Amino acid sequence: MGPSLSFRTWLLVAAAIGAPALFLLWTPRAESPEPVAEPAPASAANVRAAPPEAAKGPDTELQQVLSEPDPGRRLQGFFRIFAPLVSSDPAEALRRLRQVPAGPERTQGAFLLVQQLGIADPVGALAAAREFSAPGDGGQLLGVLFSRWAQQDLAAALARWETLPAGPARESALRALIESWARRDPSGALTWARSREPSAERAAALEACLRELAARDPAAAIAEAASLPAGNAQERVLQQAFAHLVRRQPAEAARLLPALPPGDAQTLIVSDVARALAERDIPGALAWSNGLTIDFTRWLALGSVLSVWAQRDPAAAARHVLELPPGPTLDYLAGQFVIHLAARPQEAIAWAESLRPSARDAAFVNLASAWAQSAPAESVAWALGLPAEPTRTNALAAAHAVWRSLDPAAARKWLEDAGLPPATRSRILAPR
């Protein structure tokens, strides 16, 4: 959602960027045309006597400003004209804004106009917000409007929201309305959201409430997130709530995490929890991580703990990995941990050679990639000298992919000169 600025703030901005006038002259339009006397023919003397500004109407001035090639000066000039007009004659401002092509001037002008209309002309404000909302902008104008209305008159804001047609804009307006409501009356907003029939709008309202709750009481937000349908909304709430909880109470976050249903939310959060625990107690973090029952989730947690440990005592962390029993856990962790040793490639190679074969091969491939970040030619040469397949080609592919991203011409020339079999070349160039 875009920033919600008061009209006073916009005027201050306009003044700061060089708007010397407080208002523009404008001519009100009559409701119905009135008879106008035929003007007397202008004499050449009269035409010569007219100042040049008389021939330049407001629309011409606007077009001249919008033709300014410098973006900063163009926006300054636009606000010099538009900001005072919004205050003095919103209807004329609306007419002018319709002449402005898509871009920063139109977007910021629409925000300013909608803010002003929202005070005295809610119907006009709603119409303008819908008119100037661009596809894909997330309904920002409507969000600004309904957030403000929710602060001024909640019942009226809800009634106006009900008039919106179904679609993303209606949902965006609801989120803004509920967020504003929940900041002032969290229990009332949550009760209203729960009372809605199951739908995408109910989920959006609940999410807005719970995201506000996450900042104040993350544990309660985590518990309430169970009322959301599984999917993106639930994951967003959980991630935000756990982010707050990890900073304040990592042990509580660790206790609650295993209770989450397996899925993306748990996978995304586990590394942060493990890292926060390790910052305080590495043995305790290892014990917690090893207690996780889903393999990949456990590996992610252990990798995060080892990352913290490697910064403090890389030798001790390296010994811990070497002492792990053979199996998929060791293979995964060896491949991840060797990245922390890649700044000293020869030491990393010696460490990896102490591992069991499957873990060693995983470490070699990731070492080739990490080493190539700083010395791609050396990494590729080392990978080419590995004795066994498929580790050699896998390591070559990993190192060469990094080299191609850093120096495509040099990487291509090396591959052309290497004399590798076509099948090997294809595997090296295959998407990773």
Image: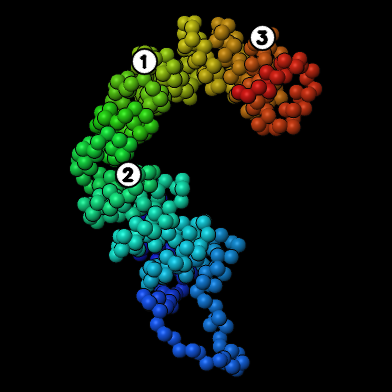
Q: Amino acid at mark 2?
A: Arg
The amino acid on which the numbered mark 3 sits, given as a three-letter code, is Glu
Quadrant location of the C terminus in the rendered image: top right
- Residue under circle 1? 292
Front label number (1 vs 2) = 2
The residue shown at (42%, 59%) is 110
Residue 417: name its quadrant.
top right
* Residue at mark 1 to residue at mark 2: CA–CA distance: 35 Å
How many numbered callouts? 3
> Of helix, strand and loop, which one carries label 2?
helix
Q: Amino acid at mark 1?
A: Leu
Q: Secondary structure at mark 3?
A: loop
Q: Which residue is mark 3?
A: 389
- Position of residue 216 measured from the top left corner of the image (x, y, whole percent): 26, 38
Circle 1 Cα neighbour tier, 10 Å, few/some/many (<14 / 14–19 / ≥20): some
Q: Nearer the viewer, mark 2 or mark 3?
A: 2
Q: Mark 1 falls on what kind of element?
A: loop
Could you tell me if residue 211 is visible in this image?
Answer: no
Decide if residue 90 is on the left or right side of residue 205: right
